Amino acid sequence: MGYAKLLEEWDDLLARRPAFREPLAPYGALLESWARWSEEGFLRLRWTAQECQERWQREVPLLSEAPLSIDRDGIEDLVATSLELLSGLGGHDDAIRHFAEAWDAGEINPAALYPGKGRIGAARLEEGVGVPQEVVSFLACGTLRPVLDAYFAECRSHLTGTAWAVGVCPFCGAPPGFADVTEGGQRQLACHVCGGGWVFPRLHCPFCGHQTAKDLVRLDAEEREEGYFISACLQCRAYVKELDRRVRWNAGSALIEDWGSPHFDLVASRAGYWRPLPSLIQLARRAS
Ligand SMILES: [Zn+2]
Ligand SMILES: [Zn+2]
């Protein structure tokens, strides 16, 4: 999807929820940086359906075997915007300094932010460079999204309903950022790191694979909003927000609905649940 369209949806959402306009302003700046990124001279992945499906049958996300090397200069604006967002939240000064120094010195490259098995970003970013996992996850999304989105554009249609039943994105390998219940009643997980989506069983935890019904709960917000709910797992304590499109047929894209519903993140955080890709609330809470 084009980022001009996402910006439009974001404006619509803020019009619907004007109280969030100010606290969520950083997301608008991030979206604008994604819209500014130019695909010129960038090579998309041209794998055939067969080449993609061969990886998916082995439960391998495409990115882990794809020959993608992102030019550092091409994403400087994205890196700068993401670091500015963190800086504006306050409390992340050490992480920002550590990341910026290592980046400027060429010690880390864009690939260090790629999702890997069981985590987002290379372990050495956390252990060696000193950037907390939460911040690494945020930076991966903030700086890679438009690039990976373009990279996988030609391969999206190769994913068919049953080809992938894993809890991470079949394209980039990141954990889901949001879930939609589609018109047909299926659960469609959304990846914020590359913009991918995939169908996943409704009664499985995408984060740990747990599937005992009594351990998969719905958290209730004080002010309920029809169609929105929070699914949480008592085993791994992770949660994902979901939106039933059969009730909310005119809602925005998964990313927009996720960013635009921080009140549900607050409910989940207060109840002691976490999400792999932090929202502004989690990043700001860490800061205070
Ligand atoms: Zn992805
Ligand atoms: Zn779980």
Image (cartoon, grey):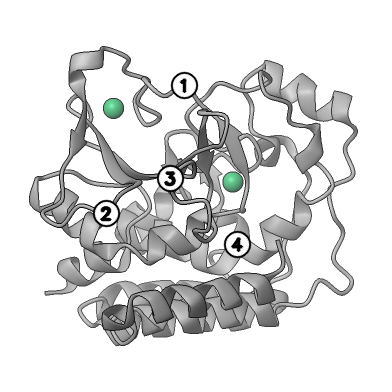
Measured in 3D between alpha carbons, the distance from the residue under mark 2 to the one under mark 3, in whole angstroms, is 11 Å
In this figure, which residue is indicated by the disc labeled 1?
201
The numbered mark, 1 or 4, whose residue comes first in the sequence reads: 4
Find out whether the residues at labels 1 and 4 contact each other: C-beta distance under 8 Å. no
- Looking at the image, is mark 1 or mark 4 nearer the viewer? 1
For label 3, the crowd category at 10 Å Cα-Cα, with few meaning under 14, some 14 to 19 and many 20 or more, is: some
- Looking at the image, is mark 2 or mark 4 nearer the viewer? 2
- The type of residue carrying mark 2 is Glu
In this figure, which residue is indicated by the disc labeled 4?
145
Q: Quadrant of residue 169?
A: top right
The numbered mark, 2 or 3, whose residue comes first in the sequence reads: 2
Measured in 3D between alpha carbons, the distance from the residue under mark 2 to the one under mark 1, in whole angstroms, is 23 Å
- The type of residue carrying mark 1 is Pro
In this figure, which residue is indicated by the disc labeled 2?
225
For label 1, the crowd category at 10 Å Cα-Cα, with few meaning under 14, some 14 to 19 and many 20 or more, is: some
The numbered mark, 2 or 4, whose residue comes first in the sequence reads: 4
The numbered mark, 3 or 1, whose residue comes first in the sequence reads: 1
